[in-house]
Image (cartoon, rainbow, N blue to C red):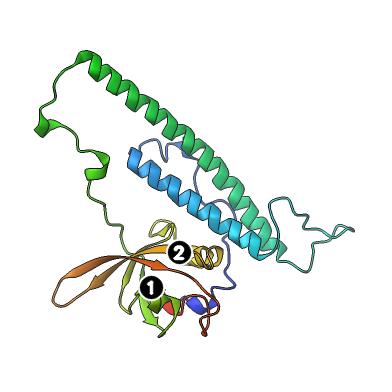
Amino acid sequence: APFTMSNLHAPTVPSGPTSAPVSNGSAAHLSFAELQRKKDAIEGELKALSGVLDSHGVDMNTNLLTPDGFPRSDIDVAQIRTTRSRIIHLRNDYKELMALIEKRLHEHFASIQDDQEESTPVPIDQAAPLPDSVPEVLEQPFAKVNSVVDNSPAATAGLKAGDLIRSFGYVNRSNHDSLRKVAECVQGNEGQNILVKVSRSTAGTRTQELRLTLTPRRDWGGRGMLGCHILPL
């Protein structure tokens, strides 16, 4: 069934942890640049999940029960508990990831020191490229823009029907969870800028890679916060 962006004000948050512990070897083999990207992704998701709690008017410590011990009826207790659980797992992942990044930095500077002590000149053509000079690896698209409403936040950002979405904030092909994470990202970033990377076919066989800034809003005059309809690939 197609996923409609107009339903984004009531997203579902998947239950249970979906990220494996960093120490399980899932991040140990990653390059420093990939570790940084993973760190940015976790920070982005934590911010969005915090926005989900804010939308319910609660935080990590708010009591979800009535004085006589029943779940409160004025809030979505199930969604809040799921969101809190995800935040706790992500915080643990983040802590382990930061320890790994710190370890890599120590190893990096130690190896530089060793190299300086050996003072062996490295020929220019054999020197490893600097992280900044490595071309960005394009992520595989995970969704396609099916339609865009005129004068909507999506139209203002420059999204067009037919665009292939490579990343939507912290959401990409590996974690979009049938586009549920897109809904979560939008709800947690109302009024905030979200970086969207898209691939657009132009005349002939040429393809444009674009970086668009999308700002979800409720007050644009239409349904949902984006005004576009996207389908999973």
- The total of numbered circles placed on residues is 2
Residue at x 59%, y 72% (from the top left corner): 10
Residue receiving disc 1: 157
> Quadrant location of residue 127?
top left
> Quadrant location of residue 233?
bottom left
- Left or right: residue 214 versus residue 140 is right
Q: Residues within 10 Å of mark 1 (few under 14, many from 20)?
A: many
What's the amino acid at mark 2? Asn
Work out which residue is located at the far top of the displayed protein and give it: 117
Residue at x 19%, y 34% (from the top left corner): 128
Residue 59 position (above or below residue 107): below
Q: Secondary structure at mark 2?
A: loop
Q: Is residue 219 visible?
A: yes
Q: Earlier in the sequence, mark 1 or mark 2?
A: 1
Residue 11's spot in the image, x, y percent? 57, 69
Residue 91's spot in the image, x, y percent? 57, 44
What's the amino acid at mark 1? Ala
Q: Is residue 30 visible?
A: no
Residue 53 position (above or below residue 122): below
CA distance for labels 1 and 2: 10 Å
Residue at x 46%, y 66% (from the top left corner): 178
Residue 159's spot in the image, x, y percent? 35, 75
- Left or right: residue 50 versus residue 124 is right
> Quadrant location of residue 92?
top right
Residue 12's spot in the image, x, y percent? 58, 67
Q: Secondary structure at mark 1?
A: helix
Residue at x 31%, y 73% (from the top left corner): 163
Q: Which mark is residue 193?
A: 2
Cβ–Cβ below 8 Å for labels 1 and 2? no
